[in-house]
Amino acid sequence: MSPVTTRRTRGEGQWALGYREPLNKNEENKKNDDGLNVRQRIIDIYSRRGFDSIDPADLRGRFRWFGLYTQRRPGIDGGKTAVLEPEELDDRYFMLRIRIDGGQLSSEQLRVVAGISNSYARGTADVTDRQNIQLHWVEIESVPAIWAALESVGLSTTEACGDTPRVILGCPLAGIDAGEIIDATPEIAAIGERYIGDPALSNLPRKFKSSISGCAAQCTHHEINDVAFAAVRHPDSGEAGYDLWVGGGLSTNPMIGKRLGTFVRPGQVPEVWAAVASVFRDYGYRRLRHRARIKFLLADWGPERFREVLEKEYLGYALPDGPAPAAPEGGVRDHVGVHAQRDGLHYVGFAPRVGRLTGDALRVIADLADRYGSGRVRTTTEQKMLILDVPGGSVDALTAELAAAGLPAKPSVFRRHMMACTGIEFCKLAIVETKGRAGDLIAELERRLPDFTEPVTINVNGCPNSCARIQTADIGLKGLLVTDAAGKQVEGFQIHLGGSLRGGDAQGSGFGRKVRGLKTTAEELPDYVERVLRRFEAGRESGETFAQWSLRAAEEDLT
């Protein structure tokens, strides 16, 4: 055994190998007290005594187990993000993440979130690319009342953040899509009921992101989740089930997940999911936070060994072999626009501007869902939303009201395919502004390129952590400080080109191309994007996508 292998085995803090002593401050805090226990302290102590009473280990650690992060203190520029101590970046207000497993909401639930937004969060509400809704400006004194309101309609912030099983992605069309292989709603619900908030899985090495979907478009991106169940049909029996993937993820070290090659029947999904999470809990690396995601364990072990440990040590039975999912047709993996449901009704997918909404807008959406549909609303992994169950005769009236509310069901290609993370406005990790910058970019591109129709994804991220999936976008923008023509440091972006997720067995998926030194100031961003899109239109071959073109284009066409 090589010295490197010995050091990695002995020094990674893997519980299953007997190494239970914490190897960093985060692990020490988790050993001292389970993050789930902070809820009662928030209710009994912190909400009554105020912000200054909060223990720092709770404030910057355990609060995340209930979806709470301190937001960035206003006025701190991006150059100080990595310089200041956490307490210098902390504001006295919080971001609160509401978990929405499967993206499924009722109009009643959405109306309650709207009320919370207006009463406690200055009217803020962002739909995220993991189907959650995030509020800002929340005070600790308000949190118990917010929880009571959410829980009265079956919503929660439990394990919305932290080293826990976070929200489970699911297709927003589950149960209504004519092309779906299987409705994953029961599996998602069963996991939520059995395991979310369970102390047995509340101390994982790092975050644990899940996807379970029967969607033909594979809209939940099984390739880049920690664990994913992608719907398939068994080639022999025709039975619908799932192909199991493990070890996907982005951030600063992106990896495409790996198939374990198994066929998982629907009734097995909850226990298989829990078994994968348990392997991660026991064998995951806890020494260094930046190596603690399950993708690093999978990369070291390989899928064969992971499957062997999963079956022999955790399940107690072997899973049958199964096929890979077929690649989605058409390549576009969202649900924007007006489309028929399998029951003859329609769903209407619409595009908030890079996920940014308000409490008033949420109330409008809830009212429209009641007036034109059955009250069922969905969130997507592209920061978009859907209203379900709309009769054909009501579609035009609904789309007109949505458009009047600034929520178009027929958005421009730029609005449809652009996402942005929270950015420096609220996020303590951010270096640049994102939401407003992306909104301005949409407006500029709509003005400059009104006839452009190719579905080019543009993802705007405020730091290297890739919350907005920069590595898988056609044009991925990573926020950083750059030097402008006058020699001043200003906000800007490093540019990634040609990222793509092809779905299916992930063949052809990749993280694109970084051209050495390819950066732009934020002010010059619209000029750059316009220029590269015009070069794409002029130089593409018939049927060629932007990702394909950018991977073969000469550097001078990309700079």
Image: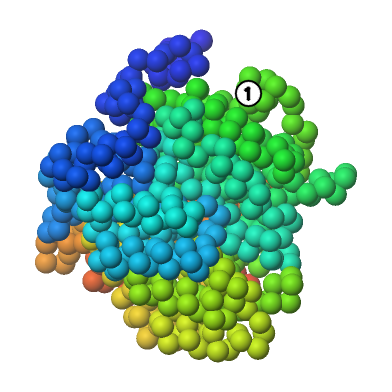
Q: Is residue 530 visible?
A: no
Q: Is residue 276 visible?
A: yes
The crowd level at tag 1 (other Cα within 10 Å; few <14, some 14-19, many 20+) is some
Of residues 300 and 193, the one nearer the viewer is 193
Q: Secondary structure at mark 1?
A: helix
Residue located 63% across and 38% down the image: 270
Residue 162 falls in image quadrant: top left
Query: To which residue does mark 1 refer?
Result: 314
Of residues 408 and 285, the one nearer the viewer is 408
The percent position of residue 539, horizontal first and vertical second, equals: 52, 74
Residue located 71% across and 60% down the image: 180
Of residues 120 and 173, the one nearer the viewer is 120
- Residue type for callout 1: Tyr
Residue located 68% across and 61% down the image: 175
As drawn, which residue projects farthest toward the right? 236
The percent position of residue 294, horizontal first and vertical second, equals: 49, 33
- 241 displayed left or right of 160: right
Residue located 21% across and 41% down the image: 46
- 516 displayed left or right of 433: right
Instruction: Examine the rendered structure and indicate whether residue 406 appears above or below residue 13.
Output: below
Of residues 116 and 229, the one nearer the viewer is 116
- 99 displayed left or right of 542: left
Instruction: Examine the rendered structure and indicate whether residue 231 appears above or below residue 365.
Output: above
